Amino acid sequence: MSKPLEGVRVLEVAAWTFVPAAGAILADLGAEVIKVEPPTGDPQRALKNMLNLDKNGPNPFNEVPNRGKRSITIDLTTDAGREVVMKLAESSDVFLTSYLPAVRAKLGLDVADVRAVNPNIIYARGSGWGDRGPMRNTGGYDLACGWATSGFAQRLLDSIGDDAPPSQPPAFYDLQGGNTLAGAISTALFQRERTGHAPIVDVSLMNVGMWSMCPDLVGAPYQDKPMMPDREHPGNPLTNWYKTSDNRWIYLVLLQADRFWGELCDVMLRPELKDDERFSNMGARFQNKEACVAVLDEIFGAATLDEWKQRLDGFSGVWAPVLDVKEVHSHPQIEPNGFLPELTDNDGITFRIVSTPMQFDEQPTIPQGAAPELGQDTELLLMDSGMDWDEITRIREAGGLG
């Protein structure tokens, strides 16, 4: 089966997770993605692997954003290195970068520079704070640009009533940003195909973070403080979360609460609640929300999570238990949908990795391979671009290659 982006070549001059994650998605979709790294490698390679301290496992920080790519080591601070990048750009469809504007200008890798050798290339930039404005040359990671600045961390802080916000999951907004950037690049390829115009693409982590908080941000000018979810005083007690007897949690998401109330009462083995005037319809449950939550707390707290899974099996409303990341691996939807395909890295370690959340022709989007070793494709890529050994040797001796 062909991949949607088969035949597309992406030249990635980027580091860390956000922008390389976009490259990984494009590689999953069939594009040839050439990862340009300095001789010392993308600093992501050296990031301490706190997510997997078992030496027999993979490094998620490297595998997640770099799977399926080809790696070439180039010293972009040299004239010879810049010559190599421009040679690769000539035959590329997309130039993908995370470099700040001042760095791009210093290295001669800005839009005009790259389009001087390939006028039809799509130039895609991923940034922390946006490519314009007073912070355009300020570096940014997702913890600062997305988590802290979007209002998300403060919302969590207000919600839990603690004196410090909780930590961000690793690469939380980086991966959302990578997905957005990959989608934008694919749209740009479509536009070029239809109109002949190759646009400049921009995605920033700040904008991605704001998008995730869109309802709150739109309503913010019209209220002193956003309405916070309160488990004991919810607008709808059937869109709420309840603790089981073994200290696990279940989310009910019954937006059309009247439609499911009777069935839920039967599942809870409390059919008499259907006729309880305090809870008989959505308006009554809102007026008596504290009492309704207290009743549901007592009911859910009387059985274990496994017992509730058996009772709720077949229930037509939406619900889900709170899972930890190990439990996600055994969720019954994983295998049928190919959400966690297997990869084998360059050390021979086989592991599971999350598939790109797009499927075509009812087939999972499976990564094309593991993350490359540093510079493993350098010579092959140069020969593919038309260079012979003498030219490669000249460039290496001039300091252009790692």
Image (tube, helix red, strand yellow):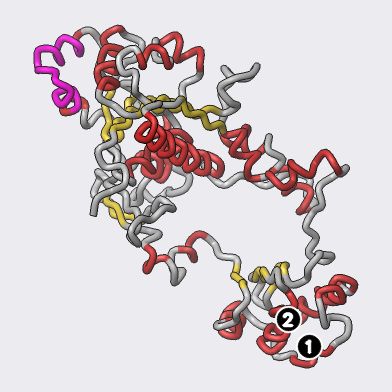
Residue 395 shown left or right of residue 151 in the figure: left
Q: Total marks drawn?
A: 2
Q: Quadrant of the N terminus?
A: bottom left
Residue 346 at x, y = what percent?
A: 25, 43
What main secondary structure does the magenta stretch of the protein show? helix
**Three-letter amino acid code at the position of disc 1:** Lys
Numbered badge on residue 274: 1
Is 346 in front, or is 280? 280
Residue 139 at x, y = what percent?
A: 56, 23
Q: Quadrant of the C terminus?
A: top left
Please tell me whether residue 376 is drawn above or below residue 5 in the rendered image.
above
Q: Give the magenta range.
A: 381-396
Is 352 in front, or is 361? 361
Residue 394 at x, y = what percent?
A: 16, 9
Residue at 85%, 87% (x, y): give it.
Answer: 276
Residue 39 at x, y = what percent?
A: 31, 21
Residue 392 lies in the magenta stretch: yes
Q: Residues within 10 Å of mark 2 (few under 14, many from 20)?
A: many
**Three-letter amino acid code at the position of disc 2:** Trp
Mark 1 secondary-structure assignment: helix
- Dividing the picture into quarters, in which one does residue 337 lie? bottom left
Tell me whether the residue at label 2 lies in contact with that at label 1, contact meaning CB atoms closer than 8 angstroms: yes
Is 183 in front, or is 170? 183
The tag earlier along the polypeptide, 2 or 1, is: 2
Residue 30 lies in the magenta stretch: no
CA separation in Å, label 2 and label 1: 7 Å
Residue 225 shown left or right of residue 319 in the figure: right
Please tell me whether residue 286 is drawn above or below residue 383 in the rendered image.
below
Residue 374 shown left or right of residue 299 in the figure: left
- Dividing the picture into quarters, in which one does residue 64 lie? top left
Q: Which residue is mark 2?
A: 261
